[in-house]
Image (cartoon, helix red, strand yellow):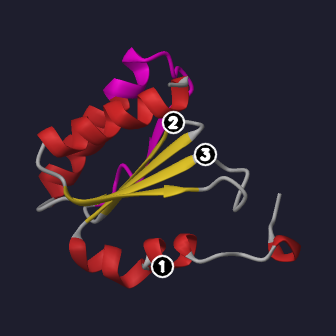
Amino acid sequence: MDKISNLKTIILKTLDSNKALDIVTINLEGKSSIADYMIIASGTSSRHIQALSEQVFNEFKKNGIQNCKIEGKDSNEWKLVDGIDLIVHIFNPEKRKFYELEKMWSELIPKEKLMI
């Protein structure tokens, strides 16, 4: 198993063990150069979303991703943890439904429309 797949498994277990809801993984290979995978999850409250983002951030650091960062630190509704090759979005359920990232990124994108 390669390093990214191992890290993805660790992050998924971290989210699950910390009671994240509706965890989805999207393979971005052939869709975007921003990352290899995107993980989307929901939290039950602003404190839960904050705690989940910090747990994911710490796992990235423990696993050698030194350039990782958390976006949306001032938001109570979402966080993005950028682990370079693995991006984790954590939303409250209403914001998640509004943005529909699963739908947007799961659809097949013709190669002519891919942005590099």
What percent of the width, then of the height, locates residue 105? 56, 70
- Judge by depth and name the residue closer to the eye, 110 or 116: 110
Instruction: Residue 64: say if magenta.
Output: yes
Taking the spot 69% from the left edge, 62% from the top edge, the residue there is 31
Quadrant where the image shows the C terminus: bottom right
Question: Decide: marks 2, 1 in contact (CB < 8 A)?
Answer: no
Please name the amino acid that badge 3 sits on.
Asp
Check if mark 1's residue and mark 3's residue have beta carbons within 8 Å.
no
**Mark 1–mark 3 distance (CA, rounded to whole Å):** 17 Å
Cα–Cα gap, marks 2 and 1? 22 Å
* Callout 2 amino acid: Gly
Residue labelled with disc 1: 103
- Element carrying mark 2: loop
User: Would residue 58 appear left or right of 34 to someone viewing this image?
Assistant: left
Quadrant housing residue 41? bottom left
Who comes first in sequence, dot 2 or dot 1?
2
Residue 73 coordinates in the image, percent (x, y): 36, 49
**Mark nearer the N terminus (3 vs 2):** 3
Query: In this rendering, is residue 68 above or below 98?
Result: above
Residue 26 inside the magenta-drawn segment? no
Residue 70: quarter of image: top left
Residue, disc 3: 36
Range shown magenta: 58-75
Q: Is residue 109 above or below residue 3?
A: below
Judged from the image, the secondary structure of the residue bearing numbered disc 1 is helix
**Amino acid on which the number 1 mark rests in the picture:** Lys
Q: Name the residue under label 2.
A: 83
Q: In this view, does 94 lie to the left or right of 83?
A: left
